[in-house]
């Protein structure tokens, strides 16, 4: 074994570095390994010289002793035979010492890296890393999109301990905030149904985390207080995203509902791109679950008329329209094309809110309500609003003979918008009707809270109507080079300006 050598680099290592001795030991082991290789090379050369003294082909065949003299050995010379030597074939053999040297170098590298891991990660996480413990929930974390400001380092994300859920009383309080504060006028679920699912254990953990993230900003509990306030519940939103990251290949309505809650949370935080991404994922997974074909003939062929089956179908129906309205928001606000077109949707409008909230199976012969439900009006507004936004966002091109003229499309959309106004807006005169509290909107609350929600309904519908009107008429304001403006239209526009 070669003696240990001292290199100049080893003399320059500061004594204050706690890892200096380990690194010096590793470098010396590499140097010793190199010296050992030189000694082994000399021994190998001597053994090769001995192996070269092999018998010729004639002596090997006759099995007699050969002096291995080249080009003619002594036996072949006496017997006057042709002396021929076959080429030497050497087989490479791995020395046992080489494996030991590699293992020693790996151990030295581990001793160098272990202190660095303990400095970066907490003690408990560092122990998990050394034991090779990985979380199965994060193996597919690359399958789901996380917003840029929401991402965390991989080494921390993969070994982060599970987030502890609050007590059941707090979770039920968060459910109340989501139903009554986030979606009071058109809830995709009801307080009673959500509480029953939670108490029976049917509510998945990722949905519970999303509910806590949504309701945290409305809570005054000290554990949810943060600045800015809209960022409350951020840890639960991240946890929910991690839990559903491995479920996108096995979608279910629960996953769709959770993605919509995360989209709503991102909208509330002012992160529109993240909300649009979550909503797009929810739309695609809803199609995988066939939520857009709920009322197709063969969809509910095995369902009976029980209350539970009706509630399940109604929940899926309302969940689809919740996804649909969120997708139409991106069409109208962000000027993006629609993902699902109205012609491909086979879903009836939801049942009356009163029946849905109270769990009453509607009668097929029941007369329609005198005042249309808010959820009906919202869906109709988003339908026409989405078509108007698509019409306004498309690039205008010269009209072809086979195409429907823009003027005809404009007139058709304008008439449809006015038809909706004639059906809905007369019921929304100012001040709003207080009998809405008595017409089945049990989810709106009572007293000052119920009156506030009624006013929110009034202004929401009017803003949606006039917003669609502005988008439709604004699309005809700009002019293009191929469009000729008549002198009459020019003079009319000038007179309108003055």
Image: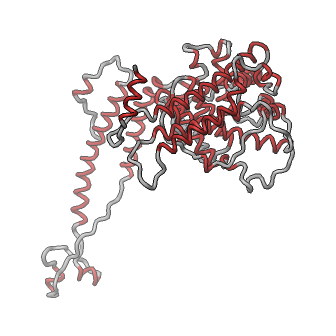
Say above or below: 33 vs 425.
below
Image quadrant holding the C terminus, namely top left
Residue drawn at x 63%, y 18% is: 217
Residue 243's spot in the image, x, y percent? 61, 36
Residue 448 lies left or right of residue 272; in this view the side is right
Quarter occupied by residue 80: bottom left
Say above or below: 142 vs 168.
below
Residue drawn at x 60%, y 31% is: 262
Q: Which one is in front, 294 or 393? A: 393
Q: Which one is in front, 142 or 35? A: 142
* Residue lying farthest to the bottom in this orientation: 80
Observer able to see residue 166 = no
Residue drawn at x 64%, y 16% is: 224
User: How many dots with numbers?
Assistant: 0
Quarter occupied by residue 327: top right
Residue 130's spot in the image, x, y percent? 51, 34
Observer able to see residue 319 = yes
Say above or below: 102 vs 181.
below
Say above or below: 262 vs 453.
below
Residue 251's spot in the image, x, y percent? 64, 45
Residue 479 lies left or right of residue 239; in this view the side is left
Q: How is the image coloured?
A: secondary structure
Image quadrant holding the N terminus, namely top left
Residue 19's spot in the image, x, y percent? 38, 24
Quarter occupied by residue 353: top right
Residue 493 lies left or right of residue 434; in this view the side is left
Residue drawn at x 78%, y 26% is: 441
């Amino acid at each position: 074994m070669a003696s240990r050598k001292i290199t100049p680099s080893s003399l320059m290592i500061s004594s204050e570095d706690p890892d200096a001795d380990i690194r010096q030991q590793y470098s010396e082991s590499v140097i010793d390994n190199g010296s050992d290789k030189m000694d082994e090379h000399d021994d190998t050369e001597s053994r090769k010289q001995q192996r070269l003294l092999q018998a010729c082909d004639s002596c090997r065949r006759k099995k007699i002793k050969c002096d291995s003299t080249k080009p003619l050995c002594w036996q072949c010379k006496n017997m006057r035979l042709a002396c021929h030597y076959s080429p030497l074939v050497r087989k490479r053999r791995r020395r046992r010492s080489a494996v030991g040297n590699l293992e020693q170098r790996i151990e030295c590298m581990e001793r160098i890296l272990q202190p660095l891991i303990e400095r970066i990660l907490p003690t408990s996480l560092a122990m998990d890393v050394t034991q090779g413990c990985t979380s199965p929930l994060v193996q597919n974390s690359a399958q789901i999109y996380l917003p840029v400001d929401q991402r965390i380092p991989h080494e921390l994300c993969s070994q982060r301990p599970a987030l502890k859920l609050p007590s059941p009383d707090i979770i039920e309080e968060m459910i109340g905030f989501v139903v009554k504060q986030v979606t009071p006028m058109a809830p995709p679920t009801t307080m009673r149904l959500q509480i029953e699912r939670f108490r029976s254990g049917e509510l998945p953990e990722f949905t519970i985390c999303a509910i806590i993230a949504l309701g945290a900003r409305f809570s005054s509990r000290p554990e949810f207080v943060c600045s800015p306030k809209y960022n409350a519940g951020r840890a639960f939103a991240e946890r929910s995203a991690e839990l559903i990251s491995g479920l996108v290949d096995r979608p279910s309505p629960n996953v769709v509902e959770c993605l919509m809650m995360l989209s709503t949370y991102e909208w509330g935080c002012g992160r529109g791109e993240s909300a649009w991404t979550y909503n797009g994922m929810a739309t695609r997974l809803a199609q995988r679950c066939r939520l857009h074909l709920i009322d197709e003939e063969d969809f509910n062929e095995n369902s009976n008329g029980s209350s539970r089956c009706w509630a399940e179908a109604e929940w899926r129906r309302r969940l689809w329209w919740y996804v649909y309205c969120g997708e139409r928001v991106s069409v109208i606000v962000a000027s993006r094309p629609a993902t699902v077109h109205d012609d491909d949707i086979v879903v009836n409008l939801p049942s009356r809110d009163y029946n849905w909230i109270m769990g009453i199976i509607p009668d097929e012969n029941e007369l329609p309500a005198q005042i249309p439900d808010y959820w009906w009006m919202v869906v109709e507004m988003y339908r026409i609003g989405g078509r108007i936004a698509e019409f306004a966002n498309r690039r205008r091109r010269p009209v072809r003979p086979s195409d429907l003229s823009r003027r005809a499309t404009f007139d058709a959309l304008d008439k449809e918008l006015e038809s909706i106004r004639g059906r809905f807006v007369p019921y929304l005169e100012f001040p709003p009707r207080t009998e809405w509290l008595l017409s089945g909107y049990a989810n709106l609350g009572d007293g000052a809270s119920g009156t506030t929600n009624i006013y929110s309904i009034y202004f929401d519908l009017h803003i949606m109507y006039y917003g669609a009107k502005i988008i439709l008429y604004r699309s005809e304001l700009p002019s293009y080079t191929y469009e000729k403006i008549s002198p009459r239209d020019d003079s009319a526009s000038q007179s309108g300006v003055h």
